[in-house]
Amino acid sequence: GSAEVSYLVFAGELGWKDFWFAFAGPTLAGNIIGGSFIFALISHAQIRSEKDTTEKMERDRKNKEEKLRLEKAQKLKEADFTAKREI
């Protein structure tokens, strides 16, 4: 781990060049790439979730409008039928 490598550097057993090129550089690159990947994955999941919610809300709104339209048409039919019966 980093504690062991740092100990070797400060004890003089490992040079700074070896430390940076053999340990710190690859570790830094891996953390940057891995962190970017995890961040992108989480962001994608969040946006996809929000998109699904938005689509569901839009679908529910359209269904509600259609239901209200059908109820209104049914009431008009009933009123028309009642008016014809009274004549």
Image (cartoon, rainbow, N blue to C red):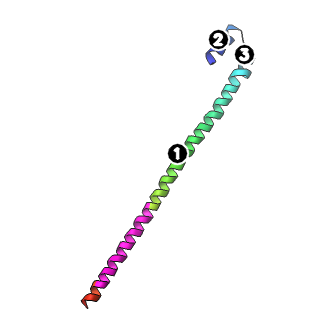
Residue stretch in magenta: 60-81
Frontmost residue, 60 versus 20: 60
Q: Residue at x 66, y 15 (%)?
A: 5
CB contact under 8 Å: marks 2 and 3: no
The local crowd at label 3, few if under 14, some if 14 to 19, many if 20 or more residues have their Cα within 10 Å, is: some
Q: Residue at x 37, y 69 (%)?
A: 68
Q: Secondary structure at mark 2?
A: helix
Q: Secondary structure at mark 1?
A: helix
Q: Residue at x 73, y 13 (%)?
A: 15
Residue sitting farthest toward the top: 11
Task: State yes or no: residue 68 in magenta.
Answer: yes
Q: What's the amino acid at mark 1?
A: Gln
Residue 6 image offset from top left, x and y in percent: 65, 14
Q: What whole-number distance in Å separates the C-alpha atoms at marks 2 and 3?
A: 12 Å
Disc number for residue 7: 2
Q: Nearer the viewer, mark 2 or mark 3?
A: 2
Residue under label 3: 16
Q: Residue at x 50, y 53 (%)?
A: 52
Residue under label 1: 46
Which quarter shows the N terminus?
A: top right
Q: Is residue 65 left or right of residue 85?
A: right
Of the numbered discs 3 and 1, the one sitting upstream in the chain is 3
Query: What secondary structure prevails in the magenta region?
Result: helix
Q: What's the amino acid at mark 2?
A: Tyr
Residue 21 image offset from top left, x and y in percent: 74, 22
